[in-house]
Image (cartoon, rainbow, N blue to C red):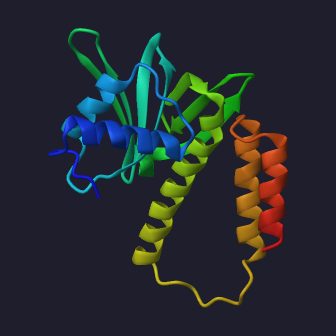
Amino acid sequence: MLDYKTASKDQLKAEMKRLAAVVSDTPFGTKKEFFHLPEVLNSGEQPLAIASGMMDGNTWLITLTNQRVIFLDKGMIFGVKQVDVNLHNIVGVGGKTGLIFGEIMISTSGQNYTVKNVIKSSVIPFTNLVNETRNSITNAKVSVETPAPKSTGKPSFDDVMDKIERLAEMKEEGILTDEEFQQQKQRILNG
């Protein structure tokens, strides 16, 4: 595992390429943001993937770590804008694709972040990875805090309905397409 705090510029360049490849992104105009990343990472925090796009008229680097999503915009000469969204605070993640570019939307209970002009091929892999990471943290926390109920092998009717209702809400909010909703609903119903 690369130690970002002590890594050389060449190691960081190679790591930037590796993290972008995780979600098929081709980062543009975000090298200075990536080189700033070691200054904002917490101890034990590990980047999992990066993407780049436009937010508020500027090019931002979006970094998914094992703890949060970090949005970074480093000014041309000086100044840094940084937005951190803890994975526990994310209530929705969505993506939209167009002909060449797409959008990544990340929502908390009080704020929505939309990054536009993201390379189309990286939108779905990045949003899926955010969801998987968030869910794995949530599931690990739940399993530590509460003992697992005795399993009958099948989820209860109420659990199934709760999951389908959550999917329907995500579809209503535009986070899921109709096709994604139907796929996830079938997955839940098939147990």
At 77% across and 66% down in the image, what residue appears?
A: 188
- Which residue extends farthest left? 6
Q: Quadrant of residue 97?
A: top right
Percent x, y for residue 78? 20, 12
As drawn, is 47 to the left or to the right of 119? left
Q: Is residue 131 visible?
A: yes
User: Height in image: 187 above or below 103?
Assistant: below
Quadrant the C terminus occupies = bottom right
Q: Quadrant of residue 165?
A: bottom right
Q: Is residue 85 visible?
A: no
| The N terminus lies in quadrant | bottom left
Asked if residue 117 is positioned above or below residue 38 in the image, the reply reads above
Instruction: Tell me what residue is drawn at x 47 percent, y 10 percent.
Output: 57
Q: Residue furthest front?
A: 10
Query: Left or right: 39 with respect to 149?
Result: left
| Residue shown at 78% from the left, 40% from the top | 177
User: Residue 58 at x, y = what percent?
Assistant: 43, 13
Q: Position of residue 109 (x, y in %)?
A: 50, 39
**71 is higher (above) or lower (below) than 161:** above
